[in-house]
Image: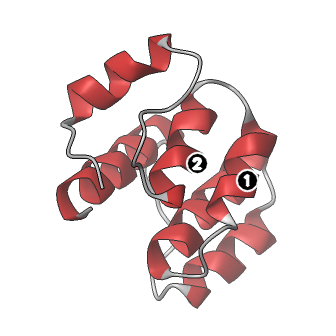
Amino acid sequence: MVSLDLQTFRDSLAKPQPPAGLSSALQALWWDAKGDWHKAHERAQEDDDAAGMRVHAYLHRKEGDQSNAEYWYRRCGAAPSILTLDEEWEELARGLLHHG
């Protein structure tokens, strides 16, 4: 697992591929920030853990599929986010970068 801060993670978006060693959930956020929702969705589904489910919920919320998003929020035990999409992305990225 690679250790990055949020700014380094954001700076890596200028590259064609995510940094090596990122969790699937962080890769999903990386691809989402690059504008590739489908690749982000694929990565979010790779691990059936709380982090993957939480990012999966965010992605369906961003897609506009609120009922699917709520399903994934429930699966990971999180309340549906009331943040803006940008704020939720940052909250997720900070949390995942901090906790690995």
Q: Are marks 2 and 1 in contact (CB under 8 Å)?
A: yes
SS class, disc 1: helix
**C-alpha distance separating marks 2 and 1:** 6 Å
Instruction: Check disc 2 and report the residue beneath it.
Output: 28
SS class, disc 2: helix
Tell me if 66 is positioned left or right of 83 in this view. Answer: right
Question: Which quadrant does the N terminus fall into?
Answer: bottom left
Q: What residue is at 26 percent from the left and 58 percent from the top?
A: 95
For residue 23, which quarter of the picture?
bottom left
* Between 98 and 23, the one nearer to me in the picture: 23
**Mark 2 or mark 1, earlier in chain:** 2
Task: Identify the colour scheme used.
Answer: secondary structure
Q: What residue is at 77 percent from the left and 47 percent from the top?
A: 63
Q: Is residue 36 above or below residue 53?
A: above
Q: Is residue 70 above or below residue 13?
A: below
The amino acid at mark 2 is: Ala
Q: Is residue 49 above or below residue 40?
A: below
Question: Which quadrant does the C terminus fall into?
Answer: bottom left
- Total residue callouts: 2
Q: Position of residue 4 (x, y in %)?
A: 21, 39
The amino acid at mark 1 is: His
Q: Position of residue 72 (x, y in %)?
A: 65, 77
Q: Position of residue 14 (x, y in %)?
A: 47, 11
Q: What residue is at 70 percent from the left and 67 percent from the top?
A: 45
Instruction: Check disc 1 and report the residue beneath it.
Output: 41
Q: Residues within 10 Å of mark 2 (few under 14, many from 20)?
A: many
For residue 33, which quarter of the picture?
top right
Q: Residues within 10 Å of mark 1 (few under 14, many from 20)?
A: many
Q: Position of residue 2 (x, y in %)?
A: 27, 47
Tell me if 29 is positioned left or right of 88 in this view. Answer: right
Q: What residue is at 21 percent from the left and 64 percent from the top?
A: 99
